Amino acid sequence: MTSYERKCLALAASLAAEKSKAVQNAWLTELPCEFWNKYQQLVRMRARALERRLFLASHRLEQSLSSLLAQFEQKLGAIRSEIECQRTDRGTLPAEREIYRDLVELRHEFEHVEVDCSARTISVLTEPIEFEEVSLGAFRIVLDLSDRECSYAIIAVDPNPAASNESVTHPHVQDEALCEGDGRTAIRTALAQCRFLDFFHLVANTLRTYNADGPFVALRDWLGVSCGDCGATANPEECFACGNCELGLCDDCASRCQICSESSCSACIERCALCEESTCGSCLKKCCKCGELVCSDCRGSEDQCEECHEETLPENDAQATAPQSTQASVEILALRMGEDAVPA
Amino acid sequence: MKVLVINNDGGGFADYMDVEPNTTVATLFGQVTKSSRAEDYLIRVNRQPCAADQILQDGDRISFTPTKIEGAAS
């Protein structure tokens, strides 16, 4: 027997004993004694109420008893289902030799398999994984058996994380945790039944599959975002989306509106007909007189550009100046001591 | 005869099944997975690779593991 096989045997013996003990003890502690105690208490209270001829109280206690019995029945049903599940678990609970065979077989299926009895970990190494010409490197799957939850980590051996998030080393791995997706139930069942060969196959196969519908970071954005205007690849954190068509843009190609500062692509950005500054479509308004698109800074009134508005000013000025001169003379007259202001 | 069938597709059940003598791996695959694409599965008999026409023996352990499992983001 090799050193590796001895380790496998020791770990298999330990795990089989623990699992067997856990299954044997699982349901004995879950009996619903509190329901039974409450039932007896309500029966005694009802008897006392009847002795004292408190019929209304007695009626209410009977309703409580009925409700309690329904809950009791529900709880017993849940326990019965739980026991059925545990009986199935016991039926498929791998014996020590099955766990041992799984661990030994791991070496034929994966590279660099390590079994650490003191740390109670099993780890395997996948082959280098590549999707759509994005090389992600190999991953070490480390299963920690020291706690009952049996957690595991996915460690990138030669990480090539997403440009936008260094903690994402694989489209479905963030902070060394795999989002199992479709494999979740099968992975959990394999772990619960100590089928470690199946567990590592399931996790490795999930790592080998790319689901474009639900990645932490999509492969097309892995190295950065391609600018929609110039086509250059840029870091997503330094990119902008066109406020109109949502096209991804690099910093050089994003034109900012002088009014609202929103970024726009070259196709969506426009210019004010008067000041000729870059302005987005939302901040431009058509002059009702000349029909030119002008920004808010170049509008003389709500619906006219500055130039058209000025053309209408002389008529308005004549009307506006007359009352002002009257006011001035009134003020001058009022300044004279001992005289009243004379209205025009 | 009785064999242990482990279907790692979907829920991932493991249970004993009664099968007819001379049942092949391909026949059992069709019964258990309802799939016609055996190439999308890693199929093992007693943890060893097997041929589609391999005849099952009493007490065999057969596992079907999908090779394409779609992860998610959260």
Image: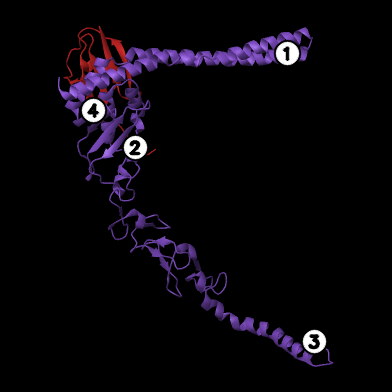
Picture quadrant of residue A98: top left
> Given the image, what chain letter belongs to the residue carrying mark 1?
A
Q: Earlier in the sequence, mark 4 or mark 3?
A: 4
Q: Amino acid at mark 2?
A: Ala
Q: Amino acid at mark 3?
A: Pro
Cβ–Cβ under 8 Å for marks 3 and 1: no
Residue A69 image offset from top left, x and y in percent: 60, 13
Q: CA distance from mark 4 to mark 3?
A: 106 Å
Q: Earlier in the sequence, mark 3 or mark 1?
A: 1
Work out whether A275 lies above or below A20.
below
Nearest-to-viewer mark from 4 and 3: 4
Pick whichever, A24 or A106, lies toward us.
A24
> Is residue A68 in view?
yes
Determine the colour of chain A: purple
Q: What is the quadrant of the N terminus of chain B in the image?
A: top left
Nearest-to-viewer mark from 3 and 2: 2
Q: Amino acid at mark 1?
A: His
Q: Quick check: A75 left or right of A210?
A: right
Report the residue that reaches farthest toward the right. Answer: A338
Q: How is the image coloured?
A: by chain
Q: Which mark is residue A177?
A: 2
> Which residue position is annotated with label 4?
A115
> Which residue position is annotated with label 1?
A59
> Given the image, what chain letter belongs to the residue carrying mark 4?
A
Q: Which mark is residue A25?
A: none
Q: Secondary structure at mark 1?
A: helix
Q: Which mark is residue A343?
A: 3
